[in-house]
Image (tube, rainbow, N blue to C red):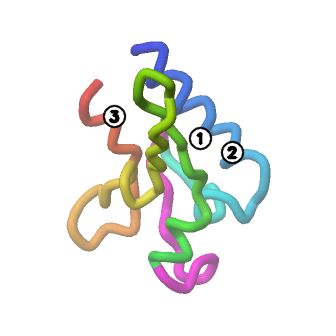
Amino acid sequence: MSHHLRAIKNSLNYFCDQSSENCGGNRRKGTCWLYNPENNPTIEDFYASFGVFAFYFGEEEDHKYEWRAQDYLYQETSGSRWFCLGLEVFE
């Protein structure tokens, strides 16, 4: 696993463990989290409960890119309430 991938996973795990309101209530299996409408009434609320990763690009690192949960999570299977870290697919 690359250093960058490990850092992203560690940051996400740390964030999720900080509060029971983070990461959809933090009910997970591996790197997948359960969307529970009782905790988050809408999928947008679920996504909003996850952290945002900020990356800086350019020679002077003056271009900021924010990576939100809807960018890095994918639905495990159609109709599933499990959402998984998309980086796993490419490991």
Q: Residues within 10 Å of mark 1 (few under 14, many from 20)?
A: some
- Determine which residue is flagged by label 1: 12
Q: Is residue 91 above or below residue 28?
A: above
Front-lying residue, 79 or 66: 66
In this rendering, would 90 be left or right of 57?
A: left
- In the foreground, 40 or 62: 62
Which of these two is toward me, 47 or 54?
A: 54
The residue at the point 41 percent across, 14 percent down is 2
Q: Amino acid at mark 3?
A: Glu
Residue 67 rendering spot, x and y as whole percentages: 45, 49
Find out whether the residues at labels 2 and 1 contact each other: C-beta distance under 8 Å: yes
Choose top left, top right, bottom left or bottom right for residue 77.
bottom left
Direction left: furthest residue: 78
Identified at 29% across, 24% down, the residue is 91
* Mark 3 surroundings within 10 Å by alpha-carbon count, few (fewer than 14), some (14 through 19), many (20 or more): few
**Residue 88 marker:** 3
Name the residue beneath numbered marker 2: 15
Asked if 2 appears above or below 62 in the picture, the reply is above
Between the residue at mark 2 and the residue at mark 1, the CA separation in whole angstroms equals: 5 Å
SS for dot 1 = helix
Q: Which residues lie in the magenta part?
A: 30-42
The kind of secondary structure the magenta stretch mainly shows is loop
